[in-house]
Image (tube, rainbow, N blue to C red):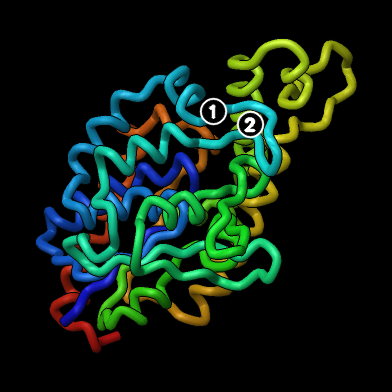
Amino acid sequence: MKVGLALGAGAARGWAHIGIIKGLEQLGVKIDVVSGCSIGAYVGGAFVSNKLDELEQWAYSLTEWQVFTLLGIGFRRGGLANGQKVFEKHHEEFCVPRFEDAEKQFTVVATDLYSGKEVIFNTGLINQAIKASCAIPALFTPIEHDGRWLIDGAVVNPVPVNQCRNMGADFVIAVNLSADFRPQMIDKFEREHAENQLKTDEFLEKNTTGFMKQWFSSSSKSDRPEPPGIVSVMSSALEILQARVTRSRLAGDPPDILIEPQLLDVGLLEFERAEELSKKGFEAVERLAEQIEFQLRNPYKD
């Protein structure tokens, strides 16, 4: 039986993928094919290159200031950051150059900015594919590829179960990092979500100077509430969109196992919390261990 792993989008939340993969390996699950979207592609690339341990060690070492430096925040055409250092680090230390060099079949998903079509990468250079898949709208500059401008795959396919099926997987384990945006969760934790989004604004405001602060700031000296900062608006809107697209896609093509770690309090850019997030991912696998083991032994039973 061929087992596929679909790693979903979720920005900093994606470090949970590391713990999830480690948890599955501890259960003895052999992954044959991997599909990734956005941060899922970033972590997936290291996994299929047998470099997950190296990525984990680096991610655990990140500080808030290092995150800001790596993202390359600053005004530029098409986005607020270029992320060049993040992708160079991945290319040089955590990933093989080409899909053909990977130890497992690997597919990366991006989105054509103008047609809205899903763009699939499974041959050629991995680095270019991951940069396109991670190009969060308004945060990262779109990536030009073969005459098309590409953005984050989460816009059309946040958890690419279908791509595992297309690679021949008989059994698909999917990871959804947007479970906290289900309607019942929003009703219960609306205040926490608002506070979570403000973390992103505070991070950017703290690490920028001069006129750039006005773009990121949501603070006010008056009693009247100020609207959230630009990045908070962008990230929250994208998360809502992503959660709804995910529910639709998973309903149409459900995985055999769905792992949904609870990551309610994690901001878009809190990449310095990698160790904590990885642990949450590992714990999510532990909670489903019996179900995973049973279904892998009996894949055609309800």
Residue visible at 60% across and 30% down in the picture: 200
Mark 2 or 1: in front is: 1
* Nearer to the camera, 128 or 86: 128
Q: Which quadrant holds the N terminus?
A: bottom left
Residue visible at 32% across and 47% down in the picture: 281
Residue visible at 61% across and 44% down in the picture: 141
Q: Which quadrant holds the C terminus?
A: bottom left
Let me know if residue 288 appears in the view.
yes
158 with respect to 114 (left or right): left
* SS of the residue under disc 2: helix
* Nearer to the camera, 208 or 221: 208
Above-or-below relation of 284 to 64: below
Instruction: Identify the residue position indicated by label 2 in the image.
Output: 195
Instruction: Give the image location of residue 18, x and y in percent.
Output: 28, 46
CA neighbours of label 2 inside 10 A, class few (<14), some (14 to 19), many (20+): few
Res. 72 mark: 1
* SS of the residue under disc 1: loop
146 with respect to 298 (left or right): right
Residue visible at 62% across and 40% down in the picture: 139
Q: Residue 209: name its quadrant.
A: top right
* Nearer to the camera, 146 or 211: 146
* Kind of residue at badge 2: Glu
The residue lying furthest to the front in this view is 147
69 with respect to 40 (left or right): right
Labels 2 and 1: the sequence-earlier one: 1
Instruction: Give the image location of residue 89, x and y in percent.
Output: 34, 35
Let me know if residue 286 appears in the view.
no
CB under 8 Å between callouts 2 and 1? no
